[in-house]
Image (tube, rainbow, N blue to C red):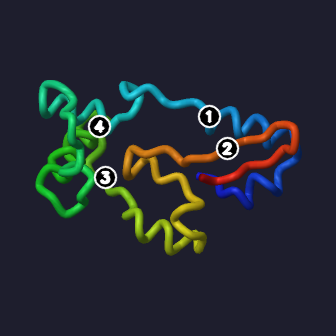
Amino acid sequence: MISAQQLDALDPQTRQAMLSLLAEVRAKEELIARRAIKALEGEEPENLDRYIDQDSPSYQRMLDKIAELLNVTTLRYQRMEDMIAAIGLPREQLCTYCWTGQALSYEYNPRQQELNLL
């Protein structure tokens, strides 16, 4: 996870490479949570909200399935609000895709080498 301020501090070549990576959208099949949900449901449901709520039984079933797929005995994810508090930046400046499925919205102007969060 990288903030706009951290991007600003990078050298131009590294920054461009990072922006290219941010611009790519990872295929859903690559995300282990999506694979776990598909294994539990038989297909990916339209609404994933019950899997996002870390206090829901569906979330716990998904976590158990991910642990099984990874062949680990214990698995926990950091809560989004705890992560945001630890970083100390406004939520709007952070990519929360792993929690919400919504990518960070930004606009990049290569001529000015500028990243504008939307």
Q: Pointers 4 and 1 in contact (CB under 8 A)?
A: no
Going by the numbered disc 1, the residue's amino acid type is Ala
Tell me the SS state at disc 4: loop
Q: Real-space Cα distance between discs 4 and 2?
A: 39 Å
Q: What residue is rendered at 30% in x and 34% in y?
A: 34
Of badges 4 and 2, the one in the foreground is 2
Upstream in sequence: badge 1 or badge 2: 1
Q: Real-space Cα distance between discs 4 and 1?
A: 31 Å
Nearest to the observer: residue 41 or residue 75: 41
Give the image location of residue 80, x and y in percent. 41, 63
Q: What residue is rendered at 45% in x and 47% in y?
A: 97
Please tell me how crowded label 1 is: few (under 14), some (14-19), or many (20+) other residues with Cα within 10 Å. Answer: some
Residue beneath label 2, please?
107
Upstream in sequence: badge 1 or badge 3: 1
Of badges 1 and 2, the one in the foreground is 2
Q: Real-space Cα distance between discs 1 and 2?
A: 10 Å
Q: Pointers 3 and 2 in contact (CB under 8 A)?
A: no
- Left or right of 19? Residue 54 is left
Instruction: State the image quarter where residue 3 is shown.
Output: bottom right
Upstream in sequence: badge 4 or badge 2: 4
In the drawing, what numbered circle is on residue 23? Answer: 1
Of badges 1 and 3, the one in the foreground is 1
In the drawing, what numbered circle is on residue 98? Answer: none
Going by the numbered disc 2, the residue's amino acid type is Glu
In the drawing, what numbered circle is on residue 71? Answer: 4
